[in-house]
Image (cartoon, rainbow, N blue to C red):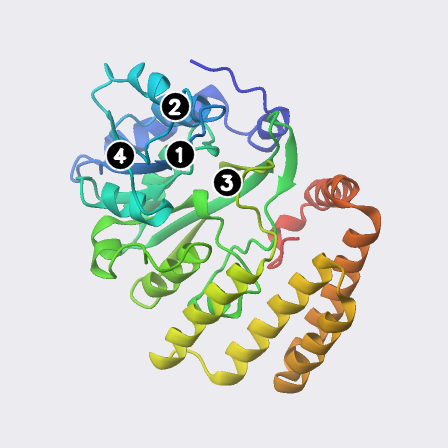
């Protein structure tokens, strides 16, 4: 069993003493009129041997044991396969390795195999926090109907150093907030009913960067969201990962998702256009093309004046990030987030 040395995680979750863990376990066991749900977790994988052991351990060492865990590997050529074979003796663990069409295809392969009630996907460089599944199952059993269960997620680096909360998390997410792209559901900290995910068609293979955004929208059209104020997952940032950096491909994916939402009648054209312009502006700012970024921001404000404040904030944030460099920006962001957390600002509606 790996001993994760996440000092910040221990600090944030310090209220979960051994007695609390026992009471949590007892709470679930006491609900004898309901059988405990099977949690199905899927990890799409390709050449992440450097990190995948920690990912696997974070799932298999959870206090909640009624799980099935599938690693769907795309034919890795590094040490991944030898690591996967080490866990074959655990009856909860399953894996395949074969060529695929990317991350979305791998997740859908897993969806076709799982037998649980609760679904989540955990990328092969991310990790679940201890007691995460207890919290998810407790929220699931307390909900009046099948719901999207989501909690908090934090950034970590290659060496497991805490980089603070993932940006723009919100304790009262709605379909409207998801569509506006102002707040984000932290993907590794989101759990959903398996049947609901299947009913909306699973993961869209045509999307490579915004497939989670697309899935959250389709699910939130049908079922409510339920928040857990607890750190459920750690999202790893490293040189080979898909980060939150805005790229042309991501903007195009989001534009496509929003276009589909317009066709379904859940989003108006003004909201969609302003959102895409804001994302494009951020992309150009990160590339250092400030003149094009300002054109995009102007268009966003003219289309939808309600994004004026957000546009001004974006200018300050992106210019600062560009001028001081990525490493110093992450350090500055961590200091600010630590200050806000220390002052209990997580109770507010807008985090970072």
Q: Residue at x 59, y 77 (%)?
A: 274
Residue 47 in which image quadrant: top left
Residue at 61% from the left image edge and 51% from the top image edge: 167
Q: Nearer the viewer, residue 338 or 302?
A: 302
Q: CA distance from mark 3 to mark 4?
A: 36 Å
Q: CA distance from mark 1 to mark 3?
A: 29 Å
User: Circles 2 and 1: CB distance less than 8 Å?
Assistant: yes
For numbered disc 3, what is the local secondary structure? strand
Q: Position of residue 285 (x, y in %)?
A: 72, 62
Task: Give whichever of discs 2 and 1 has the lower sequence position.
Answer: 1
Q: Secondary structure at mark 4?
A: loop
Image mark count: 4
> Tag 4: Cα neighbours inside 10 Å, few (<14), some, or many (≥20)?
few
* Foreground: disc 4 or disc 2: 4
Choose top left, top right, bottom left or bottom right for residue 7.
top right
Select label 3 or label 4 by which is in front: 4
**Residue under label 4:** 98
Labelled pair 3, 4 in contact (Cβ < 8 Å): no
From this view, report whether residue 124 is shown above or below residue 340: above
């Amino acid at each position: 069993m790996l001993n994760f040395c996440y000092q910040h995680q221990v600090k944030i979750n310090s209220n979960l003493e051994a007695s609390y863990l026992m009471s949590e376990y007892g709470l679930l066991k006491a609900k004898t009129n309901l059988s405990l749900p099977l949690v199905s977790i899927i990890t799409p994988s390709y050449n992440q041997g450097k990190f995948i052991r920690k990912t696997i351990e974070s799932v298999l060492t959870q206090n909640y044991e009624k799980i099935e865990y599938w690693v769907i590997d795309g034919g890795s050529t590094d040490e991944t396969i030898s690591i996967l074979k080490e866990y074959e003796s655990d009856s909860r663990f399953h894996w395949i390795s074969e060529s695929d069409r990317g991350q979305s295809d791998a997740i859908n392969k897993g969806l076709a195999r799982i037998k649980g009630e609760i679904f989540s996907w955990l990328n092969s460089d991310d990790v679940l926090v201890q007691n995460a599944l207890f919290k998810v199952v407790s929220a699931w059993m307390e909900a009046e109907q099948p719901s999207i269960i989501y909690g908090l997620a934090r950034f970590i680096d290659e060496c497991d150093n805490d980089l603070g909360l993932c940006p723009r998390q919100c304790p009262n997410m709605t379909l409207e907030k998801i569509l506006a792209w102002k707040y984000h559901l932290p993907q590794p900290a989101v759990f959903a009913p398996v049947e609901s995910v299947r009913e909306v068609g699973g993961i869209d293979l045509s999307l490579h960067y915004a497939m989670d955004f697309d899935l959250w929208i389709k699910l939130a059209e049908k079922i409510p969201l339920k928040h857990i104020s607890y750190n459920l997952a750690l999202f790893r940032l490293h040189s080979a990962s898909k980060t939150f950096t805005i790229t042309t491909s991501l903007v195009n994916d989001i534009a496509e998702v929003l276009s589909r939402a317009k066709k379904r009648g859940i989003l108006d054209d003004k909201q969609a256009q302003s959102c895409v312009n804001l994302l494009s502006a951020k992309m150009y700012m990160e590339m250092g093309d400030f003149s094009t970024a300002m054109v995009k921001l102007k268009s966003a404000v003219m289309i939808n004046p309600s994004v004026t404040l957000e546009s001004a904030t974006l200018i300050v944030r992106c210019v600062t990030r560009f001028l001081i460099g990525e490493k110093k920006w992450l350090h500055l962001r961590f200091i600010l987030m630590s200050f806000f957390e220390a002052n209990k600002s997580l109770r507010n509606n807008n985090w970072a």
